[in-house]
């Protein structure tokens, strides 16, 4: 609104300038009308040398109140008759000389008897058009200034009131309608960031502290498996190793979660990245479990990325999909002029309606059964995608025959900008 207020102020200034010109012209026209009104009687009186009649005409004009002084002079500039503020002798006046020579009305601002006035010199002619003298009509210059000053004060006063009211409404409305909401959101984001920083620091510390003991426990359990070959010992020790491996996987996720943002990116082929992620997840697949169906893009697509972190994100998405799927997980790539999207779709039960997407990407939030999920996978993927100026979205998909057909995860990434060729 400030530019609009400035423009309105400029418009008012221009309008006042035009109004001042109009007002000045109106005041000049008033003097001209007065001069025309007494021109004939004054001319006739001068022809008759009737100074009393000339004086009477001037006195009648002076009583109207629109003039500050009225005088009649002969062609030599000598005063014939006057009323009000006047000049005694105009024989040396250039304006008076110009009126006699051109026979045209002249006007100017001047000082008469120490006062600032606006003077209009009107030629007096006889019936034959011969100049026999001239008339000076004076109006106070203050009349011009006062009329414009009053108009200017009203205009700028109105603008100032409207400007203050507009600013007050905007400030109050912004605070009530926008500012408080924005401040609240910013405060929530700040707290969330502080929370994430704290979680990252704690995660890193916990992961490092757990790493060494878990390695020792797994090593001792492996040695005990070699020494005790009875079924019960084998079962118990395998259970210990299984829980250790689960904790080790959580430690790796904690370390990945606490890593610093991407600092260096390299060109990466999407097809190569997908193959590597599918190969990494294949070691966790069982032969009779759900399988991954990968559809490569029709052409080679390159993006700028941290290959290791992006592969980690894909592995987490594929792991979740395989754990949720009943028979198959489909992976496909769709392209657009400025971005690509990787679609991972499973045929499981889909996402529960009670959990929003923004909650699923928060650390330690999971829809899996107790003990089956750490709640770090999607949070890790979300941060990796943000580091790559990409996005993560989750939704349930369905076909004509199904109300719900599992979950579809979409990873959207900006395409690598190709260099212009000359």
Image: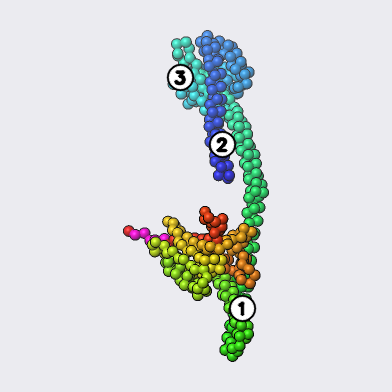
- Label 2 neighbourhood size at 10 Å, few (<14), some (14-19), many (20+)? some
Q: Earlier in the sequence, mark 3 or mark 1?
A: 3
Q: Say which of marks 2 and 3 sits in front.
A: 2
Q: Is there CB contact under 8 Å for labels 2 and 1?
A: no
- Label 1 neighbourhood size at 10 Å, few (<14), some (14-19), many (20+)? some
**For residue 37, which quarter of the picture?**
top right
Residue positioned 48% across, 67% down in the render: 292
Instruction: Please state the horizontal and vertical placement of residue 124, each as a whole percent of the image.
Output: 50, 16
Residue positioned 64% across, 63% down in the render: 191
For this rendering, which residue is in front, 359 or 116?
Answer: 359
Asked if residue 75 is positioned above or below residue 226 in the image, the reply reads: above
Task: Estimate the spatial distance between the alpha carbons at disc 2 and disc 1, rounded to whole Å.
Answer: 80 Å
Q: Is there CB contact under 8 Å for labels 2 and 3?
A: no
Give the labeled residue for mark 3. Answer: 103
Could you tell me which secondary element the residue under label 1 belongs to? helix
Q: Which residues are magenta?
A: 417-421
Residue positioned 63% across, 50% down in the render: 178
- Res 272 visible: yes
Give the labeled residue for mark 1. Answer: 243
For this rendering, which residue is in front, 388 or 324?
Answer: 324
Q: What is the chief secondary structure element of the magenta stretch? A: loop
């Amino acid at each position: 609104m400030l530019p609009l207020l400035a423009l309105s102020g400029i418009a008012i200034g221009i309008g006042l300038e035009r109004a001042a010109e109009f007002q000045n012209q109106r005041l000049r026209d008033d003097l001209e009308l007065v001069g025309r009104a007494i021109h004939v009687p004054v001319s006739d009186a001068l022809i008759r040398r009737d100074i009393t009649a000339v004086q009477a005409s001037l006195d009648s004009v002076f009583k109207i109140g629109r003039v500050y002084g009225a005088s009649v002079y002969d062609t030599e500039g000598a005063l014939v008759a006057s009323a009000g503020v006047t000049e005694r002798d105009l024989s040396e006046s250039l304006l008076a000389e110009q009126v006699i020579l051109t026979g045209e009305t002249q006007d100017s601002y001047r000082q008469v008897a120490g006062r600032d006035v606006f003077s209009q010199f009107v030629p007096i002619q006889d019936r034959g058009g011969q100049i026999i003298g001239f008339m000076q009509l004076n109006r106070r210059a203050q009349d011009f200034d006062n009329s414009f000053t009053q108009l200017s004060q009203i205009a700028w006063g109105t603008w100032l009131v409207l400007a203050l009211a507009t600013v007050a409404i905007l400030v109050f409305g912004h605070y009530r309608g926008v500012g408080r909401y924005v401040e609240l959101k910013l405060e929530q984001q700040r707290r969330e960031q502080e929370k994430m920083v704290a979680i990252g620091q704690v995660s890193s510390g916990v992961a490092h502290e757990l790493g060494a003991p878990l390695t020792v426990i797994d090593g001792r359990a492996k040695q005990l498996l070699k020494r005790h070959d009875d079924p019960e010992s084998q079962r118990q020790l395998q259970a210990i190793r299984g829980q250790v491996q689960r904790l080790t996987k959580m430690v790796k996720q904690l370390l990945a979660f606490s890593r610093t943002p991407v600092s260096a990116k390299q060109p990466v082929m999407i097809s190569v990245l997908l193959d590597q992620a599918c190969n990494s997840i294949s070691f966790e697949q069982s032969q009779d479990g759900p399988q991954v169906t990968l559809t490569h893009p029709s052409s080679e697509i390159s993006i700028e990325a941290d290959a290791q972190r992006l592969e980690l994100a894909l592995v987490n998405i594929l792991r979740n999909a395989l754990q949720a799927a009943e028979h198959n997980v489909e992976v496909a790539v769709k392209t657009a002029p400025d971005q690509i999207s990787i679609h991972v779709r499973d045929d499981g039960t889909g996402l529960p309606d009670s959990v929003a997407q923004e909650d699923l990407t928060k650390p330690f939030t999971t829809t899996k059964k107790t003990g089956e999920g750490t709640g770090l996978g999607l949070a890790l993927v979300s941060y990796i995608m943000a580091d790559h100026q990409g996005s993560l979205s989750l939704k349930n998909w369905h076909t004509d025959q199904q109300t719900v057909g599992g979950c579809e995860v979409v990873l959207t990434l900006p395409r690598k900008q190709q260099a212009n060729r000359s």
